[in-house]
Amino acid sequence: MLPYALVRSRRRRTLCLQINPAGELRLLVPTSTSQSAIDAFLDAKADWIKRTLNRLDQAPKVPPFATGLPLIYLDEVLHLQLNYRPGGATVKRDGLTLSVVATDEGRARAALEAWYREAARHQGVARIIHFAPLVGRAPQHIRIAGQKTRWGSCSAHGTISLNWRLMLVPGALFDYVVAHELCHLIHAHHGPRFWRELERVMPDYEQRRRELHKRGAQLSF
Ligand SMILES: [Zn+2]
């Protein structure tokens, strides 16, 4: 039998087996579950475990969330320095090192995302200040969003939303989304006049647009 982590829980009623992207097994069981029940459950799952591990072997490796993990930050690559310690979570950048201190991985990831959101807000404001005079319009509000499928949006009330994950692509592509959404303040559609306006502000917008679409799949750390 493969090694597995056993988690007993009073709230749990059924047995549940999980395999994470690193191929580690975790078995969640009700407190009173006997070892023979656990063994029988794992036996019944043997085929599924084999299939899942095989599939993971063939899948591109997800780098572990650990010290040394490269983190894209616009045109820079930062390196994660991770320390698990009791107390509040902190994130601090020093040169190209991003030091995250938290009690566990979940809180470390949450703190990192909050830090990226804040960075996205600063970058978004700075780039809107840069592009707004070129477009001739400025938004009423700027919102930082986190959808999995949208880079940005512009509401009828003049709110521009930017996805914090834009920090995980080169700055030229962040700029593309800013210019694109600002142009929606003039044309609330994707008709020829909208694209002409965007081209006036950003002559190489098409190339940036294509590049951004290619990045859609790698939107995470
Ligand atoms: Zn659009």
Image: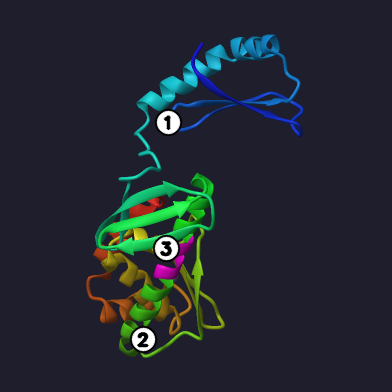
The circle drawn on residue 132 is 2
Local crowd at mark 2 within 10 Å, few (<14), some, or many (≥20)?
Answer: some
* Segment colored magenta: 114-119
Q: Is residue 107 left or right of residue 57?
A: right
Query: Is residue 8 positioned above or below 90 on the image?
Result: above
Residue behind mark 1: 22
Whether ligand 1 has any atom under 8 Å from the Cβ at mark 1 is answered as: no
Q: Is residue 104 visible?
A: yes
Closer to the eye: label 3 or 2? 3
Secondary element type, mark 1: loop
Residue behind mark 3: 116
Residue 93 in magenta stretch = no
Secondary element type, mark 2: helix
Residue 30 location (% of width, % of height): 73, 26
Q: Amino acid at mark 3?
A: Tyr
Seen at 76% across and 21% down, the residue is: 32
